[in-house]
Image (cartoon, rainbow, N blue to C red):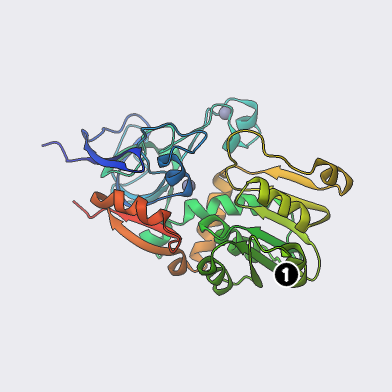
């Protein structure tokens, strides 16, 4: 008898439904995975609102996926059924110059599982066996669901160079901002200031170890931030990526410092003070996703307890309530909203 397979279909933020589709069969070198926990990403709510530059509606989400291998295709038998895995969702070509240099996160033909292809917000899905990592025994499925969201900050922090003893500003205290905070601290940053518009998010940032959390639209933001950091920031992580946050990043960063653009910018041009970028030798660098090294580092970070996963995960919903889960993840009081799938 065919296994039931429910899959979430997003037509818009107001039209999120469950479609019944046939259970897929694993092809060569593929795994059939039963989902257990799926995270909702900022990019998912962005896409559902019709604002994501690279995700077209309708789409079938689920790129932050934890599950259990239930069957293997030919060539993937090294994964025993029952193995818990997390998906590393970047699907790359392996032959372009970026892939050949090891930077497959910026593959010329990059597709993201659950963004440009149907994802894992479903009972069952198939995935190439080289696109999953094993979940360590001691790690819960809920904790494992934070590996993907943490891998992006881990990659961004690696781009900032050696942070030992450095000062850092993090603009935006959503899930990515808070995980940048954790990753930067773990990388040795001496002082970290976080900004956000919302009181609750600033309070959470302080609970999670920020040395100060400032109101993002305060008139004297730069002076306040410099007071917390004892000077300008060596590195600014812009997890907002709008005109205002980039202007603040340039105000906050030290001469010769770096601005790492982590957030997904609005489509189209964003004005920046190029005169100051030039005069102060500011380096502005984008960062996209991660590679397997970042994934392994994120796994290690969560396994070590360096990330307060309980403070990051603020709600869980069953798969059938995916619409409510999307609504919750838009609410400012939530950080990470997860969908859980009961074992069939
Ligand atoms: Zn994501
Ligand atoms: Zn490639």
Secondary structure beneath label 1: loop
Residue at position x 37%, y 42% in the image: 78
Residue displayed at 57% across by 43% down: 264
**Would residue 157 be visible to someone looking at this image?**
yes
Q: Position of residue 252 (x, y in %)?
A: 76, 58
Which residue is drawn at the image coordinates 38% and 60% (left, top)? 142
x and y percentages locating residue 245 in the rendered image: 66, 51
Against 262, residue 331 (above or below) is: below
Q: Is residue 247 above or below residue 202?
A: above
Nearer to the camera, 117 or 29: 117
| Residue 225 percent coordinates (x, y) | 73, 66
Q: Is residue 82 visible?
A: no
Outermost residue, front side: 219
Q: Quadrant of ligand 2?
A: top right
- Direction from residue 264 to residue 111 in the image, left or right: left
Q: Quarter of the image holding residue 166? A: bottom right
Q: Residue at x 40, y 38 (%)?
A: 114
Judging by the rendered image, the residue that carries numbered circle 1 is: 190
- Which image quadrant: the N terminus? top left
Q: Nearer the viewer, residue 172 or 126?
A: 172
- Residue 202, percent across and down? 57, 68
């Amino acid at each position: 008898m065919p296994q039931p397979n429910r899959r979430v279909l997003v037509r818009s933020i107001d039209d999120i439904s469950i479609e019944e589709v046939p259970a897929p069969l694993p092809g060569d070198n593929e795994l059939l995975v039963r989902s257990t926990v799926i995270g909702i990403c900022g990019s998912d709510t962005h896409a559902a609102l019709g604002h994501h530059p690279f995700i077209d509606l309708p789409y079938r989400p689920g790129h932050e996926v934890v599950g259990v291998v239930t069957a293997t295709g030919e060539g993937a038998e090294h994964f025993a059924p029952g193995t818990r895995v997390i998906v590393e969702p970047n699907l790359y070509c392996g032959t372009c110059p970026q892939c050949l240099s090891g930077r497959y996160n910026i593959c010329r033909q990059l597709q993201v599982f659950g963004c440009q292809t149907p994802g894992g917000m479903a009972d069952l899905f198939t995935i190439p066996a080289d696109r999953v990592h094993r979940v360590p025994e001691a790690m819960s499925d809920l904790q494992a669901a934070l590996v993907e969201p943490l891998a992006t900050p881990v990659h961004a922090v690696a781009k900032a160079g050696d942070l030992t003893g450095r000062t850092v500003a993090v603009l935006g205290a959503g899930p990515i901002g808070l995980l940048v905070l954790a990753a930067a601290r773990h990388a040795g940053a001496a002082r970290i200031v976080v900004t956000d518009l919302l009181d609750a998010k600033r309070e959470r940032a302080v609970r999670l170890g920020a040395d100060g959390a400032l109101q993002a639209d305060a008139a004297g933001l730069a002076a306040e931030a410099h007071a917390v950091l004892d000077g300008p920031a060596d590195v600014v992580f812009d997890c907002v990526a709008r005109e205002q946050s980039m202007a603040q990043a340039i105000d906050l960063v030290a001469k010769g410092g770096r601005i790492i653009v982590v957030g997904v910018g609005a489509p189209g041009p964003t004005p920046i003070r190029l005169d100051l970028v030039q005069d102060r030798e500011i380096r502005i660098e984008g960062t996209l996703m991660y590679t397997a090294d970042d994934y392994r580092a994120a796994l290690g970070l969560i396994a070590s307890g360096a990330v307060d996963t309980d403070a990051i995960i603020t709600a869980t919903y069953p798969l059938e309530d995916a619409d409510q889960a999307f609504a919750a993840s838009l609410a400012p009081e939530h950080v990470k909203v997860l969908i859980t799938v009961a074992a069939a």
